[in-house]
């Protein structure tokens, strides 16, 4: 007989004791007999209660262990989706599969991937990022557990919902690489806009630049503070800030560090120092990258500009800004094309101080993205 059945029988006998046949008019027991009877039943009840509790707990533990085992087995049977995985109702799987075979409209490239503008048969145009995996990280060499983890991370990125964060519309896993599909934005990225500013092809007022900075930090605040578990961007830089109509920014490629652990950050100039010293990455590392972007918006200069290598203040955008700010010469750092009204100049000098704090060498000295939203929105009304 199984143990749960034994426990139920014990419970039955304990709760419903046997009743002996008695005379129609039983005589009440003597006081001495009652006291002795109660005395005998007390220890027996305690022993039975202990045994019953132990058996019940042991049976519950067995049931719990079987439930956990069943859940794990069920999770391991979740199929690994093949072919295009589409999250947008506007994209057809077969149409996307056919379009990916014709990568003719290249938008740009980096050590980790290539960007394409891909038109679909229904008239919709999407942006496709083809990730170039490192050795040993290609889909064909990954275990099923790793593939499932990547699938779960991509589904999480597709569920994001914030006006300053781009949402993954679809992805395709092929033997040689991954393809990530986003909305195509013809206005381009913040990097494209700043390059046009440096070439005097575009004018960006301080109001527009501040609006861009506020949108970026609101997107980071959503990833850091609202998403559970927290999502880190890992590779924040102007190329990954897409500008929609009205220069409204949206963060692209959020969270790809979990899929591509060897993202190229060293050459971009936007990576935090702790990422290269001991390979640590936290939300404060994202804040450092934001500080670099804010510095670019204020100065108009790219962090890789040879100007900083020749500067006597330390050879980086952050050190140069800190040097000018401590010397009371923050105005010298500002892009001359945005100098105008006195009130705006005060806002820009305050923004220089915010950028300097974000670019602190120690992560603990940097503000959080939540604090930065309050700092920047206080500069101007948004």
Image: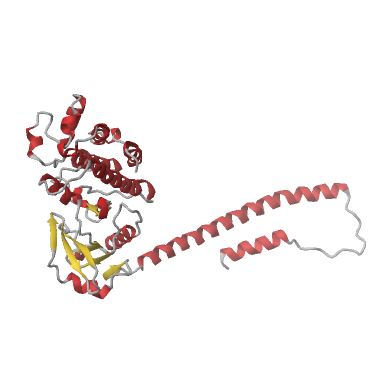
Q: Is residue 319 visible?
A: no
Rendering coords of residue 207 (x, y %): 26, 42
Relative to 204, say whether 143 is above or below. below
Relative to 309, say whether 329 is above or below. above
In the figure, is residue 363 to the left or right of 229?
Answer: left
Which of 166 and 69 lies nearest the eye of the viewer? 166
Q: Residue furthest front?
A: 341
Q: Quadrant of the N terminus?
A: bottom right
Residue in view at x 13 percent, y 57 percent = 109
In the figure, is residue 343 to the left or right of 195?
Answer: right
Color scheme of the displayed model: secondary structure
Rendering coords of residue 257 (x, y %): 24, 52
Rendering coords of residue 142 (x, y %): 23, 62
In the figure, is residue 86 to the left or right of 300?
Answer: right
Which of 298 and 320 lies nearest the eye of the viewer? 298
Q: Quadrant of the C terminus?
A: top left
Which of 207 and 119 lies nearest the eye of the viewer? 207
Relative to 310, say whether 134 is above or below. below
Which of 197 and 303 lies nearest the eye of the viewer? 197
Rendering coords of residue 35 (x, y %): 82, 47
């Amino acid at each position: 007989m199984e143990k749960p059945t034994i426990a139920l029988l014990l419970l039955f006998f304990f709760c419903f004791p046997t009743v002996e046949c008695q005379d129609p008019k039983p005589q009440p027991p003597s006081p001495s007999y009652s006291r002795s009877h109660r005395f005998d039943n007390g220890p027996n009840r305690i022993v039975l209660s202990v045994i019953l509790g132990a058996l019940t707990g042991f049976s519950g533990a067995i049931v719990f262990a079987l439930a956990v085992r069943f859940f794990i087995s069920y999770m391991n049977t979740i199929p690994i989706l093949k072919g295009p995985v589409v999250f947008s109702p506007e994209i057809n799987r077969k149409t996307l599969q056919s379009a990916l075979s014709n990568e003719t409209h290249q938008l740009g490239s980096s050590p980790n991937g290539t960007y394409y503008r891909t038109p679909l048969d229904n008239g919709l145009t999407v942006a496709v990022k083809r990730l170039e995996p490192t050795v040993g990280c290609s889909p064909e060499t990954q275990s099923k557990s790793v593939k499932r983890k990547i699938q779960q991370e991509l589904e999480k990125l597709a569920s994001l919902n914030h006006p300053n964060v781009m949402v993954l519309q679809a992805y395709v896993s092929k033997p040689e690489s991954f393809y990530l599909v986003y909305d195509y934005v013809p206005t381009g990225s913040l990097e494209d806009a700043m390059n046009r500013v440096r070439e005097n092809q575009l004018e960006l007022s301080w109001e527009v630049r501040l609006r861009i900075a506020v949108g970026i930090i609101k997107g980071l605040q959503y990833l850091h503070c609202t998403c559970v578990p927290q999502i880190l961007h890992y590779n924040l830089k102007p190329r990954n800030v897409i500008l929609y109509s009205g220069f409204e920014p949206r963060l692209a490629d959020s969270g790809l560090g979990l899929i591509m652990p060897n993202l190229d950050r060293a050459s971009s100039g936007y990576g935090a120092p702790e990422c290269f010293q001991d390979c640590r990455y936290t939300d404060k590392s994202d804040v450092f990258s934001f500080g670099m972007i804010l510095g670019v918006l204020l100065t108009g200069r790219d962090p890789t500009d040879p100007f900083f290598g020749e500067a006597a203040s330390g050879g980086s955008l952050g050190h140069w800004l800190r040097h000018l700010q401590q010397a009371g010469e923050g105005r010298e750092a500002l892009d001359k094309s945005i100098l105008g009204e006195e009130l705006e100049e005060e806002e820009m000098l305050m923004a220089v101080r915010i950028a300097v704090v974000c670019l602190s060498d120690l992560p603990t000295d940097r503000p959080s993205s939540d604090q930065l939203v309050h700092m920047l929105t206080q500069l101007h009304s948004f």
